[in-house]
Image: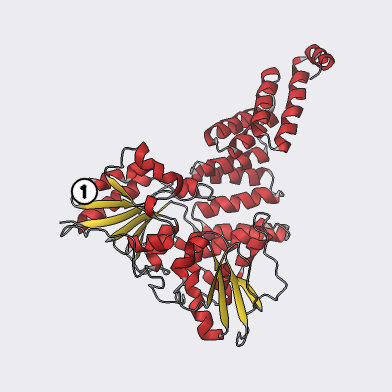
Amino acid sequence: MNKSEKIDFQQLPADEKGKVLFARAIAHHKKGDLQAALNFYARSLAFYPEQPDAYNNMAVALRKLQHYEAALACYQKSLDLREDFAGTYSNMGNVLNDLDRLDEALAAHKKAVELDPDEVQYLYNKGLALRDAGYCEDALQIFDAVLEKDPSYKDCPWDRALTYLVAGDFEKGFAEYDARWQLDKSPPRQFSQPRWQGDSLQGKRLFIHREQGFGDSIQFVRLISSIKKRYGGTVILECQPELMTLFQDCEGIDHLVPFGSVLPEFDTWIPLMSLGHLLDVREDNIPGEVPYLFPPKASRFRIRPAVEGGMNIAIAWAGSPTHQNDRRRSVPLNYFIPLAGLPDVRLFSLQKGEGRHDLQKTGASALIVDAGNDINDFADSAGLIDQMDLVITIDTSVAHLAGALGKEVWVMLPYTPDWRWMLAREDSPWYPQMTLIRQPEPGNWQAVFDRVTEKLRERLP
């Protein structure tokens, strides 16, 4: 404010001052300056506390900053001032979901739809809440209703695909999996060559481009062997540089290309994750035999075998912090530390990135071998895993790598899992040596580790 504006502002009644500051908060909010927006919302409420929109908007900003408890308190304040506003109930349902309070989240979304049944976004949010709570059939009915009301609602087909998959309906899920390209966050790659539609590849070069994360690449690379058998041709796979050495002997791949390099010539192409639909993958016909990946013939690691009756166990507790579900899937290292105290058990950390520092922060560096410092790529990880008796990990690329190597692996899952682990089962059709250990209720990692400890004690003398 300049001097004259300050004088004019000081002369305004309190409620008008609040409105002026609220407008400035919105301006900062729209620009993405959330901290400045929060400051102006707070100043606005100091002059004019009877503003439900200010509390609602504060909550939106706080949720974006992952301050979930504070956001929830603001939504509750907003509802105290305007108790029947559907938008606030829907927003509050989202933050309750963030807090893993799934039953309360679902109740809030139901209330929003009751108050405003014509708003498609509230109905869509209710569908997401139903899926996260495990009610997949109900969620699918909601998503169908959303698309009936608004066929252009572009997020909904993708979430319907994921819901089919987590419910175990691979046929319908993979059929709609290309809906991911409608999302703003994942625009499709463009090539002048035609996309492969499942026609013969004799005399042709197929380029399969990478997408999504390391685990996705490791999981779906097994499908490539069936392409050569069914369609012939030359197969060129693009993958992350960290996977190049691991994939170099993978069946069905003629040429590997690191992502980011100049592409070779090709005749047709397809995204890796679209192979599920084109190859008609179902739970009972997943192509490729396990193991389909193998450790390097000369591993840099030489691990002393466990004493008779003991176990060498590789562990991973944290995924990428940028993963949209990381708040649910990663666990504090402290949960693993008691396992190191079991007789004749040696733990080896496969952790990379920021998670490695947890060993020092928790004082566990004397109890857990930090192998992550010597791991340069996934071939190194495979060489280490190959020498383990067991792998215990959260849902991250380590789980897929151990599964693809045919190593026994226990995967600890949040109550709301990623689609590939489906629901209410302890095994995986993707990896026969895998055991899934699930949270019995949202956020309950202690029960998961109690089960892990029980299973380990059964194996030890």
Q: Quadrant of the N terminus?
A: top right
Across and down, in percent, residue 446 comes to 34, 44
Q: Can residue 408 be seen in this view?
A: yes
Q: Mark 1 points at which residue?
A: 342
Q: Quadrant of residue 460?
A: bottom left
Give the position of the C terminus as an image quadrant. Answer: bottom left
Q: Where is residue 414 in the image (x, y as percent from the top left)?
A: 43, 51
Rendered location of residue 253, percent (x, y): 51, 76
169 or 207, which lies in front?
A: 207
Evaluate whether residue 422 shows in this view: no
x 67%, y 37%: residue: 85
Query: Could you say which quadrant of the image residue 380 lies in?
Result: bottom left
Quarter where residue 397 is shown: bottom left
Task: Identify the residue at image location x=61%, y=80%.
Answer: 205
Q: Reply above or below: 424 against 324.
A: below
Residue in the image at 49% along x and 66% along y:
244
Residue 242: x %, y % from top left: 48, 60
| 412 sits left or right of 173 in the view | left
Q: Which of 461 and 110 is in front in this view?
A: 461
For disc 1, the neighbor class at 10 Å (few under 14, some 14 to 19, many from 20) is some
Amino acid identity at mark 1: Leu
